[in-house]
Image (tube, coloured by chain):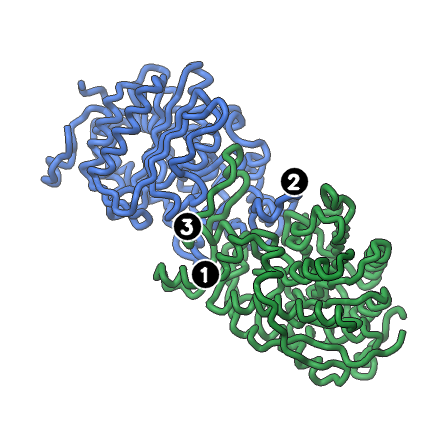
Chain colours: A green, B blue
Amino acid sequence: MEQVDSMRVVYSPRHHLHDPDFEVTGGRRIAGYEVAARVESIRHALESDPDFSFEAPGTFGIGPIRAVHDAGLIAYLESAWQDWRARGTGASAIMPDAFLHPGARAGMGDAPAPSSPCGQAGYYCFDTATPIVPGTYEVTRVACDAALTAADGVLSGERSVYALTRPPGHHSARAVFGGYCYLNQAAVAVEWLAGRTHDRIAVLDVDYHHGNGTQQIFYDREDVLYTSIHADPSRTFPYFAGHASETGAGAGTGTTFNQPMPAGTNDAQYLEAIERTLTRIEAFRPAVVVVSLGFDTYGQDPIGDFALTTPVYHEIGRRAGALDLPLVIIQEGGYDVANLGRNAREWLRGSAGLAPAFAAEDGVKAIGS
Amino acid sequence: MEQVDSMRVVYSPRHHLHDPDFEVTGGRRIAGYEVAARVESIRHALESDPDFSFEAPGTFGIGPIRAVHDAGLIAYLESAWQDWRARGTGASAIMPDAFLHPGARAGMGDAPAPSSPCGQAGYYCFDTATPIVPGTYEVTRVACDAALTAADGVLSGERSVYALTRPPGHHSARAVFGGYCYLNQAAVAVEWLAGRTHDRIAVLDVDYHHGNGTQQIFYDREDVLYTSIHADPSRTFPYFAGHASETGAGAGTGTTFNQPMPAGTNDAQYLEAIERTLTRIEAFRPAVVVVSLGFDTYGQDPIGDFALTTPVYHEIGRRAGALDLPLVIIQEGGYDVANLGRNAREWLRGSAGLAPAFAAEDGVKAIGS
């Protein structure tokens, strides 16, 4: 595989405007994991590497988002903070405490959308990890613009473009958000690409967590293959989706491919799973692959329980790049800030056919290739 | 209306074993409102009044609970604490942080019940106000036994019996719990009474909050009338049920009667609503009326926003008693501990055709009659 010109990285510093400083886990309020330093760690690692070049996202408007998300959810995310402030609670972030639950409405039909800010929060959000703060809507819109800029780049002939975004997006479904995610920028890019190419699009989701939102959005779609390698939801978030038995519905039957993995999953096990996934993607013959790129699979990640090492990210990226399909690479999770930049750099270098950086720097042994 | 012998009060001190000391509201961990002192306030007020006599609950077993609740929910509540401890988190209470949400599964069919304690929490519970602690299951079972003891009392010829229970129950639906509630003792009593009488049963829910769980359980039932006067769910918990447009389904069409009320609802407005409700109950010609009795309608309640005064509780009780139907009275909410005993005493005295106590004590002016 030949080396390419520098890889384009789409980045905006506006992500700093989304700065919730907490989440609630099991009833305990803790410092949030999804912090601005995550993206800055990656930015620093890539800025020091001449094989990457940075650019600002373009502006794509609300149209591509409306194509994916429920109008009520979009309107809520847009107005939630102002409505909350108008209520005068004084709280620095919106977080629901009572949730629309199917069991509570069983036999009663759909609930009407609530008009109060507290009810709306639990109507549109499914967890206590995803606070809305003043800058949230602007930043999730910027993330969508970045993903679309990357998508536009590959349609213009780039081999791959990387959208360095936060917050992540893959847990947000058509009409409900959560898991640190608001709008689903990967799904927005997929839909936009499907509309432009009139061809098949595949998703390679390698975040530690199952991308339940992306799966839900495309579950019945024949033209979108969703693949994910992730922690078994029977032990971890998002709990209620991501099983191997979920393979799609209707025209989309067979276009969802989940590989739930055990705690302690190591490099070798992960590479076997990647091989199965890439075989599926190749067989699908997509025009473009959208990568939901997470590094919470790393052995030191404070949330995950996998055991991946830095060298394997280069190898995973290399194999994804070896598909020889355009890659729209979108940053999702990964919470070990200290190593996030290094791991992302290796993945991206691998995907671009570039040699690992770690060998020279760290003397660690390469995997595969 | 003639004065009766002393009213039976079913009470067990075992409620102290359920002692969560917190809840989470809008992402903030605060002292819980649903505390043992609530029931003790009422106990003290009634023990000093010779018109009430205390007794312990009988034992009715799991059968009447299985008739109302999903087997998975019951098994979860029974084993949750031990499973949680076995996981070794060290947390003093179970509280979910990610919830089964219909939007997250739209088009994907039902989610399998999760096997992990964290997933189960959000599969069976819909809010962050309802922690499970070591004594929770025992105490919610005792509350059911107390409600059934009261139900058994009226079938044995008592005019009315009062189950002085906590935690409350009316927010718990067939397969999901929340709102400080675990098992739904009012629903358990209703179902048991329906089975014994082979006749119609009515629910008079006068808690400040809509009894969404009780409504859900009996929504399609022709033989159970659910009535509720409550804060409009468009502004407050439980948010997703309790609208006037919800009137039942299938054979139960017309057997749900909700009166959502505005903030600041006062004695006169409330009495008008009660009159409409009692007219509906009379027309239904039930064999027994199960009262879900809450005092969070009180003007000083820290959760509610109604403006009811102590005298009106005597009048509401008096009018309920004037139905001249057996009353199974079950304690639900009410969080102004200082006045809870007094308000409950007045309601119960009124329902039993007894004169108000407050006139002599406080010189406050009676309402109505």
| Disc 1 element | helix
Q: Which residue is mark 1?
A: A79
Crowding around mark 3 (Cα neighbors within 10 Å: few <14, some 14 to 19, many 20+) is: few
Chain ID of residue with mark 1 = A
Q: What is the number of the mark on residue B109?
A: 2
Eye-nearest disc, 3 or 2: 3
* Chain name for mark 3: A
| Residue A177 screen position, x and y as percent | 56, 55
Q: Is residue A58 above or below residue B106?
A: below
Is residue B11 visible in the rendered image? The answer is: no
Q: Which mark is residue B228?
A: none
In this rendered view, identify the residue nearer to me: A274 or A24.
A274
Alpha carbons under labels 2 and 1: distance apart? 31 Å
Q: How many marks?
A: 3
Label 2 and label 1 in one chain: no
Q: Residue A115 shows which numbered tag?
A: 3
Q: Residue at x 51, y 66 (%)?
A: A136
Q: Position of residue B13 (x, y in %)?
A: 37, 36
- Kind of residue sitting beneath label 1: Ser
The residues tagged by marks 1 and 3 sit, at their Cα atoms, a distance apart of 12 Å
Name the chain letter of the residue that bears numbered label 2: B
Judging depth in this view, the residue of A135 and B112 nearest the camera is A135
- Using the image, determine if residue B17 lies above or below residue A171: above
Mark 3 lies on a secondary structure that is loop
